[in-house]
Amino acid sequence: MPTRVLHRARPGSMVRWRGPLTGAWLACTLASGWALGQAAGGPPPVVKEQTVTNAPAEMIEAALDDAANRSTTARVDIKVTSAEAVTWPDGSLGCPQPGMAYTQALVAGYRIVLQAGEQTLNYHAMSRGRPVFCPANRVAPAVPA
């Protein structure tokens, strides 16, 4: 029975790995920074699958680093719940601070949601730059697609 193995690398790079029991080399080219390969034979390994869509790998890595510093959960145990391109309704990037004024223009960006134990951590970003932590009480929705 085939088993799924999750690998992570830079977008556009070629990833090669050996199957867990067969020793056969498997390869694929990454578009998004994540590859889900198929390995044949043996019992399925324990695999922590993560839902990742179209956010750049560098942004996801930066959010994971910050979440590890912000929580008591080890970085390897933090799960990516979602990472998607969104359009923010204004310059607050969906995380308005009370008393602040923001540009009133649509802003292309990303929303990354991480799960660190029982804690959900939200990160918002513009299309370029680093994701910024957004406390749950300030999270505002993105513009509907």
Image (cartoon, rainbow, N blue to C red):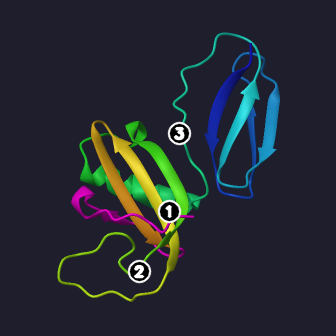
* Alpha carbon distance from label 1 to label 3: 15 Å
Q: Quadrant of residue 119?
A: top left
How far across and down, in percent of the image, does residue 110 sit? 50, 65
Local secondary structure at mark 3? loop
Q: Residues within 10 Å of mark 1 (few under 14, many from 20)?
A: many
Q: Quadrant of residue 142?
A: bottom left
Q: Nearer the viewer, residue 41 or 2?
A: 2
* Alpha carbon distance from label 2 to label 1: 20 Å
Horizontally, residue 48 falls left or right of residue 31, namely left
Q: Earlier in the sequence, mark 2 or mark 1?
A: 1
Q: Amino acid at mark 1?
A: Met
Q: Earlier in the sequence, mark 1 or mark 3?
A: 3
Q: Quadrant of residue 18?
A: top right
* Alpha carbon distance from label 3 to label 2: 29 Å
Q: Earlier in the sequence, mark 3 or mark 2?
A: 3
Q: Residue furthest left?
A: 99
Q: In the figure, 109 relative to 113: above or below?
A: below
Q: Amino acid at mark 2?
A: Asp
Q: Which residue is mark 1?
A: 59
Residue 90, disc: 2
Q: Is residue 137 magenta?
A: yes
Identify the residue at horizontal 33%, vertical 86% (top origin): 102
Identify the residue at horizontal 31%, vertical 62% (top origin): 139
For the record, the magenta segment spans 127-145
How far across and down, in percent of the image, does residue 120 sit? 32, 46
Horizontally, residue 63 falls left or right of residue 27, namely left
How far across and down, in percent of the image, does residue 6 sit? 62, 35
* Circles 3 and 2 in contact, beta carbons < 8 Å: no
Q: Amino acid at mark 3?
A: Gln
Q: Residues within 10 Å of mark 2 (few under 14, many from 20)?
A: some
How far across and down, in percent of the image, does residue 132 sit? 36, 67
Residue 50, disc: 3
